[in-house]
Amino acid sequence: MAVYQRFEAGSEKGGGGERLDLSGNDLCRVPDSLGLSWPGLRELDLSRNRLEAGPQALGPLSSLRSLRALSLAANALSALPQVVLALDNLTVLDLSDNDITYLPPELADLPW
């Protein structure tokens, strides 16, 4: 229930978009309901959690088709999450302070 309280406390509307701050919540996975609850989400901060790159942890991000900025900084990522490659509108991606040592070549083909 604390995650949903944070949804409300960390949300901002304005400027034609939406921003959601879920940083520092000790999350191991993105809540499954994120895409349903925030279909027009444009900026998402998931920094300073315990997220890993697997589909179970980050799969719900695939439903966020309007997402333009995503911070996954300071998590437990050892590889680029594949779900990120499907976010067509993404223009800002922060992967700093993770243990990623390899970026796939298809990353260079993305429009952002």
Image (cartoon, grey):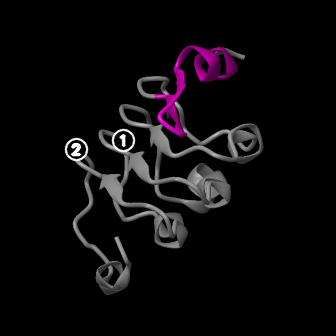
Label 2 packing within 10 angstroms: few (<14), some (14-19), many (20+)? some
Residue where numbered disc 1 is placed? 75
- Report the magenta residues as a range: 3-22
- Name the one closer to the observer, 65 or 47: 65
The residue at 53%/40% (across/down) is 17
Q: CA distance from mark 1 to mark 2?
A: 7 Å
Is 9 left, or right, of 37 in this rendering? Answer: left
Q: Quadrant of residue 54?
A: bottom right
Mark linked to residue 97: 2
Label 1: how many residues lie within 10 Å, few (<14), some (14-19) or many (20+)? many
Residue lying farthest front?
15
Whether 68 is among the magenta residues is no
Image coords of residue 78 (percent x, y): 34, 58
Please say if 89 is above or below 109: above
Circle 1 SS class: loop
Q: Amino acid at mark 2?
A: Asp
Answer above or below: position of 101 versus 5: below
Q: Secondary structure at mark 2?
A: loop
Task: State the quadrant of the C terminus.
Answer: bottom left
Quarter occupied by the N terminus: top right
How many numbered dots are placed on residues in this image?
A: 2
Q: Are marks 1 and 2 in contact (CB under 8 Å)?
A: yes
**For residue 32, which numbered disc appears in the image?**
none
Residue at position x 29%, y 52% from top?
A: 95
Residue drawn at 54 percent across, 71 percent down:
86
Report x, y in % for residue 104.
33, 80
Q: Earlier in the sequence, mark 1 or mark 2?
A: 1
Instruction: Judge left or right: residue 47 versus residue 2.
Output: left
Q: Left or right of 56: which side holds 87?
A: left
Q: Residue at x 27, y 60 (%)?
A: 100
| Dot 1 amino acid type | Asn
